[in-house]
Image: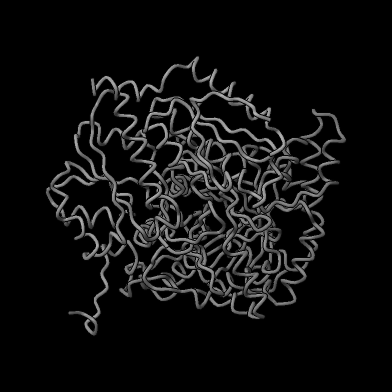
Amino acid sequence: MRLRYPDTIRIVRLPCTGKVDVGYILRAFEKGADGVYVVGCMEGDCRYNRGNLRAKKRVAEARRILNIVGIGGERVQMFNLSSAEGPKFAQIALDMTEKIKAMGPNPVKLKKMKKAA
Amino acid sequence: MIVADRKPIEEIIEYIKDRDKVLIVGCNECVTVCEAGGKKEVGVLASALRMYFMNQGKEIKIDEVTLERQCDHEYLEEIRNIVDQYQAIVSLACGVGVQFMSEKYFKTQVYPGVNTCFMGVTEERGVWSERCQGCGQCILATTGGICPVSRCAKRLLNGPCGGSSKGMCEIGGEVPCAWQIIIDKLTALGRLDDYEKLAPLKDWSKERAGGPRKVVREDVRQ
Amino acid sequence: MNQTRAVKTDSKLEKILAAGHLAVTSECGPPRGSDSDLIKKKAELIKNHVDAINITDNQTSVTRLCSLASCIHLKLMGLEPVLQMVVRDRNRIAIQSDVLGAASFDIRNMLCLSGDHQRFGDSSQGQNVFDLDSMQLIQTVRRMRDEGKFLGGDEIKRPPKLFVGAAANPFADPFEIRVRRLAKKAAAGAEFIQTQCIYNLDRFEEWMKQVRDRGLHEKVYILAGLTPLKSAGMAKYMKNRVPGMDVPDDVVKRMSGVPKEKQPEEGIKICVESVQRLKELEGVAGFHIMAIEWEEKVPEIVEMGGLYPRPNPDAI
């Protein structure tokens, strides 16, 4: 299945979404990411039982903080799918890219660029 | 441990908004265990603040460091060489650490980054509850090892009051009635007769009421 | 009937109880303002039908005219007040001081309570005190009276002569210490007990049996607490919402079984029947009738319950 997905996406591989930390997500935005999404296994199918459920809560916490700092929590999202859903993975990548493109660039990155210029 | 809770980011923004250089200092002890002021929380707060101010078009240098403890001289000394570079410190230690820092670095403004709540336990991850108020004269020997000073909403030494209902306190919020637990424990120990011993009036001078307290041990003092 | 016990104060309530009469007390809540007429009017409604009138102390932690001042108003009317005092709002200095203040007006009865937690009232962000608990308050007042000493050990000139009471709830949790707790209050020095409102008479009788088994009814006068139900809604509220209240289903059913306009009458009827049944129960020394904002019904309950006329304490 040589599926294509947008090359603007950088994949960070983790052993389990349970490794996702609020700090990781915030750092990504601080370094200029326009959006972040976390792709975990289906709920109930975590090899470590609760990894993806923990990730879900951390994504929610990251959203809360991003709303406070003015970046907008909707730039982070979590998806759950099984390893057999390659096409869906590609579709999510497309959808997320469209969504973020519509929202425009990360405002903090813009300010930083202006400062540098 | 001393249990603290995170302060709203908005509150911390208000403290530091007029500063240019701020150091956020975490503590590796209690506040790390209760996930309020350890290295991770320092990272999240610092990142959030940097993004907030950048977005506001304000350049504030926000650095991070986490010390082993903030309630001992030796660890607080570790930042002596860098303190002068900052106009303010946000300490994510408990109120003890915030104050010790403020006393030590007298010319630096130190802000609290957490709300210090109580001495308590980790009931489960994400749930901490109170066990001790440091009353200075422990009475646990007479109450089955369960503390009515910290766990009864009325600190009744001869409880329970009439508000105990199905094991819960009248104040609500799923607070267990301390006296129900004491009675259950005395029953389990086969010592319910102890319940009928009247607890004497407490000497509250050993507690907050007596003013700031101090323990001095000449045998270990240098 | 109780056997005669030694009288230690000039309390009319104590005198009546000691003489073996069934005593009747009631209570009035002070107003949320400074108009003393409101408390006087309530007292006027019941004064001929009760031996003493409790004045509540910022009940449910809602700020009101103080119990002590209200008691003084009753005292000036020639009535017999029972000063209720909670330990929630006073440290040991204020407690002893207020006790002396009450004694200076020859207030002769006091009910020692913990008090509801302040979260229920109009000052939920306020500090609480709880320097002493209710047991220790009992001990304190007894020490002041019997030893003529302050807690600090100094002598009191003209010690307060108060007849000391406490509350008991036969229905509260944890159930296994209900009688033990009464024993503890008696040991602390309580001389009379006013119970929580009784709706479950079977369970109250069971409690009284255990009380008698330990001989506690001979150490303290037990006044059975009764509150007439105004409506089926009130019965349900008491059953479901008030901690430590035992309202059996058949009482709720009985109240709901009559039309709304007849429910107050039914509530009075239940109350009167309770008086009649508990009058015969060994160890019950009297009744504490708490008609909440319904004081005008107290005379009717007392009369129909066969507790009228009240004995003249001066003739005892």
Report whether residue A3 is seen.
yes
B82, above or below B9, in the image? below
Residue at 44% x, 27% y: name it. Answer: A67
Q: Quarter of the image holding residue A54?
A: top right
Quadrant of the frame with the N terminus of chain C: bottom right
Q: How is the image coloured?
A: one colour
The x and y percentages for residue C141 are: 45, 67
Residue at 71% x, 71% y: name it. Answer: C211
Report whether residue C309 is seen.
no
The x and y percentages for residue C308 are: 72, 51
C185, above or below C251, in the image? below
Residue at 65% x, 29% y: name it. Answer: A2
Residue at 32% x, 61% y: name it. Answer: B208
Q: Is residue A107 left or right of residue A93?
A: left
Q: Is residue C87 left or right of residue B78?
A: right
Which sits in the foreground, B55 or C273?
Answer: B55
Q: Is residue B194 left or right of residue B206?
A: right
The x and y percentages for residue C296 are: 66, 37
Which residue is the extreme one toward the top? A102
Which residue is the extreme one toward the front? A2
Which sits in the foreground, C258 or C174?
Answer: C174
Q: Is residue A26 left or right of residue B26?
A: right
The x and y percentages for residue B84 are: 13, 47
